[in-house]
Amino acid sequence: MIGPLTVGRDLATVTAAVVRLPVHLTETANILLTTDSAVIGASPRDVIWTHRKTTLYRYRSQNRRHAVPVLLVFALINRPEIFDLRPGHSFVEFLLGEGFDVFLVDWGVPGEEDADLGIADYVCDELHWAVRETLRASGQAHLTLAGWCIGAALAAIYTALHADGPVRNLVVLTMPLDTHGSLYASWVKREAFDVKKVASAFEGVPGKLVNRANKLMKPVTNYVTTRRKLVESVCAGTVNRVAYQSMAKWVGDNPRFPAAAFKDWITWVYKENRLANGTVRLRGRTVDYAAIRSQSVLVVTAAADHIAPREGTLPFLDMVTTDDLTHFDRAGGHIGLMAGSRARTQIWPDLAAWMAERSAA
């Protein structure tokens, strides 16, 4: 039975919520409007090498215990600061604390003048030279190559082309491979989608356009749910302003996808599924993942990944021929797996432990 006291309490609660609503909405607006001031990519680092728009960084450390350096590689369509999202929640910071010598390749922000950069240029030149300079700076003969998203595919391709080269350990995080039946493939495989016209219309594809396409894969989540959860957390007094703003700032920073690389990627990966069927050729050489036989390989998939679903990554486990092959499957999405609030406890320690076992001189 509902008595007058219960009704009175409910009415008081509703009244208090209504009174506080303008304050909560103002706080929400302030969070959204000041997102650009968020601090991301803050770990101290030094420039080791540059070429065109690509830069190789080495992170400063007084705690290097593992001989084999780690070279981090991210995608072409977002900035690599996701590896170093914010102080206190940074994979780079974590690896430094674990005693690794950490390097990162930054593809920069391509302009129209970089429309000629294709996948072969990124793998055979930019990444190849970044590997060379990592070894030179660290004084080591081998390295761990750790790629995420498109960066994982580039790292795997590079390792296959240099099977007897300096890569001792290969780590691929949420790597696109077999795209048959994927939502992205269903969009771009249509004859109406002329990849050459799209790429040439802007001398490359604006990052904002790629970002919108990614968000349309989950439109309700990306355009409604995220903002709703922000408002709810503000009203509940549980909002983590720093965490929200750092991720929002990173998500909104989308560099241009160079025309040649966009054409290559969409054609090879989605229209023709060449990575899965083994027909990618770079500068006259076929990319054969079976050549990856002497490296230690770690494949990481995310259960809720809608951009590179784990079912599309798993064939890689049967394509490489190494005897040292490990697979981690974790909860989370394409980005949340490594940058979400639980990444520090659910995946980072396992990654560090796996690399540590394979990083002695």
Image (cartoon, helix red, strand yellow):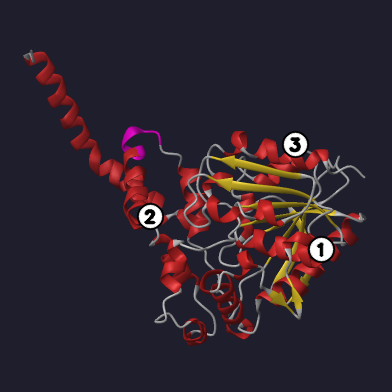
Q: Nearer the viewer, mark 2 or mark 3?
A: 3
Q: Name the image quarter holding the C terminus.
A: top right
SS at mark 1 in the image = helix
| Residue 249 appears in view | yes
Amino acid on which disc 1 is placed: Val
232 to the left or right of 244: left
Pick whichever, 46 or 280, lies toward us. 280
Picture quarter containing residue 98? Answer: top right
Can you identify the residue that label 2 sits on? 222
Q: Is residue 97 visible?
A: no
Are the residues flagged by discs 2 and 3 in contact, CB closer than 8 Å?
A: no
Q: Main secondary structure of the magenta part?
A: helix
- Work out whether 96 lies above or below 280: above
From what the image shows, is residue 143 above or below residue 19?
below
Which residues are drawn in magenta? 233-238
Whichever of callouts 2 and 3 sits on the residue coming sooner in the sequence is 2
Q: What's the mark number on residue 131?
A: 1
Q: Residue at x 40, y 60 (%)?
A: 217
Name the quarter where the N terminus is drawn. Answer: top left
Q: Tell me, for residue 353, which label it has, or none.
A: 3
**Amino acid under label 3?**
Ala
Q: Is residue 207 left or right of residue 215?
A: right
Disc 2 to disc 1, C-alpha distance:
36 Å
Q: Which mark is residue 116?
A: none
Looking at marks 2 and 1 on the same chain, the residue that comes earlier in the sequence is marked by 1
Q: Is residue 53 magenta?
A: no
Q: Earlier in the sequence, mark 1 or mark 3?
A: 1
Residue at 85% in and 64% down: 133
Q: Secondary structure at mark 2?
A: helix
Q: Measuring 68% from the left and 65% from the top, which residue is drawn there?
A: 154
Which x, y percent locates residue 16? 20, 30
